[in-house]
Image: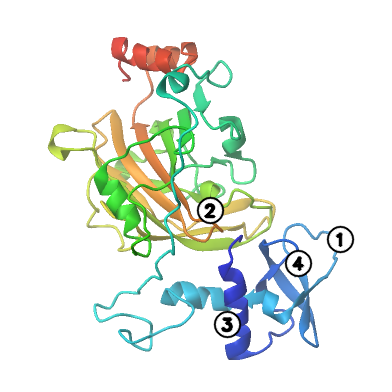
Amino acid sequence: MATPRCAEFAKDEYKRFGSLSVGSKVYARYAEEEQLWYHARITATNAGSYNVRFSGFDHDGTDHKCKQTEAFSERFLKRIMRKGSARGGGKKGDSKGKDKAGTIPRRPIPNLPEKSDPKFTLEQILSSKKEGSANFYLSISEDTKVCDMMSPILALYQCGVPARYGGEGGYPSGEIAAILRATTDDVDLQIPDKIKTAIAACFAKDESSPNEFAFEYIWCASQISDILKPKDGGSVNLVHHAWVYKDIQPGQRRQCQMPMGVFNMGDENKWAGRLEVKNPASKGGRDASHDKCTPQRVSVHAAKRNKWVMCCSPNNAKIYFDLKNPLIAFWSAAIDRDAEKPRILVQFNWMFTQRITASTYSLLQKASTLKELLDGMVITPFS
């Protein structure tokens, strides 16, 4: 975790429950000069401090010392996630932290990230060259390359990845045929008003809240035919684990509640390849919300039988569609609320439910700039 709220959690738990015992599973600050908190186990208690051993990277058995206000228990984190905040109840809540409607209130994220002036013009964006000579991978940001967006630990790209729960490591994904990445620092990006409204609703509202805000934009085209189970109907999970935990290490356990949602394009009746609303047979709370962002649990942990195999869970953020449509297109949004500065991802998703045709693959490989790709799509539409 890299969040200023970790220090708040640690101080709150110590104030309310006192010191922790040897063997407790905790999240502790790795070093005083760092703001990163990692999963660890308490090996000894001292006057005002703990000895802790971090999971995943302390192979030599080295213990680290931290203050008692620089560690909080895994149990306390689960309590927070269950109640929606570190303190249950309140003026409008009951002893279980629920409001009158029976839902768990979420603490609003303080401030929308402010938007800055873009660095590049549209002409510069259109002439940007893709990475390599195979599939169409292009990042407009100078400090980020698509090839570096693949998490070697989770084997997922750092974006919203269509995947299916239940395989080795938790989420086998389809082939990512194209990624275009940019931020509002790079270019003046416009998104549908309903997505802006849904994102803004997750943040605290005050007079200083900007009408426009900074976000990361990704267009992702993927072939999902290999991970579909036709007998179960059209359904996959939209996975953000690698986007949330870019710095995950083998053996670590990290989890959070991430607001996310999906949005169909424009007039839903005019686009056949749209997402369908919740499947009545599915369990409540597992499906991605439509037209709003609601918390979805994101958990990364080691496999039970092999601590060096990292898994993503749980089976949630599910989306549904009609398998008869060869191309499903929709918007999605996700918010990393625990980052030091909240991060927002707005993604335009293309999912091919059948094998991508040879003409489409040829276009992806031959196009070297965004302009060439767009011009080619007019002549040879994706199919």
Instruction: In the rendered view, tell whether residue 13 sits above or below residue 379.
Output: below
Of labels 1 and 3, the one closer to you: 3
Residue 165 in sight here: no
Report which quarter residue 294 is drawn in. Answer: bottom left
Q: In which quarter of the image is the C terminus?
A: top left
Q: In which quarter of the image is the N terminus?
A: bottom right
- Residue depicted at x 47% and y 50%: 166
The answer to whether the residue labelled 1 contacts the one labelled 3, judged by CB atoms less than 8 Å apart, is no
Q: CA–CA distance between discs 2 and 1?
A: 27 Å
SS type, badge 2:
strand
The answer to whether the residue labelled 4 contacts the one labelled 3, judged by CB atoms less than 8 Å apart, is no
Residue where numbered disc 2 is placed? 312
Of labels 2 and 3, the one closer to you: 3
Q: Which of marks 4 and 2 is nearer the N terminus?
A: 4
Residue where numbered disc 3 is placed? 12
Please name the amino acid that badge 4 sits on: Glu
Q: CA–CA distance between discs 4 and 3?
A: 19 Å
Q: CA–CA distance between discs 4 and 1?
A: 21 Å
Report which quarter residue 284 is drawn in. Answer: bottom left
Horizontal side of 181 relative to 188 (left or right) equals right
Residue 185 in sight here: yes
Residue where numbered disc 4 is placed? 32
Please name the amino acid that badge 1 sits on: Asp
Report which quarter residue 379 is drawn in. Answer: top left
Please name the amino acid that badge 3 sits on: Asp
The answer to whether the residue labelled 2 contacts the one labelled 3, judged by CB atoms less than 8 Å apart, is no
SS type, badge 1:
loop
Instruction: In the rendered view, tell whether residue 360 sits above or below residue 274.
Output: above
**Residue 47 point in image, percent of width and height:** 80, 88
The answer to whether the residue labelled 4 contacts the one labelled 2, judged by CB atoms less than 8 Å apart, is no
Q: How many marks?
A: 4
The label shown at residue 60 is 1
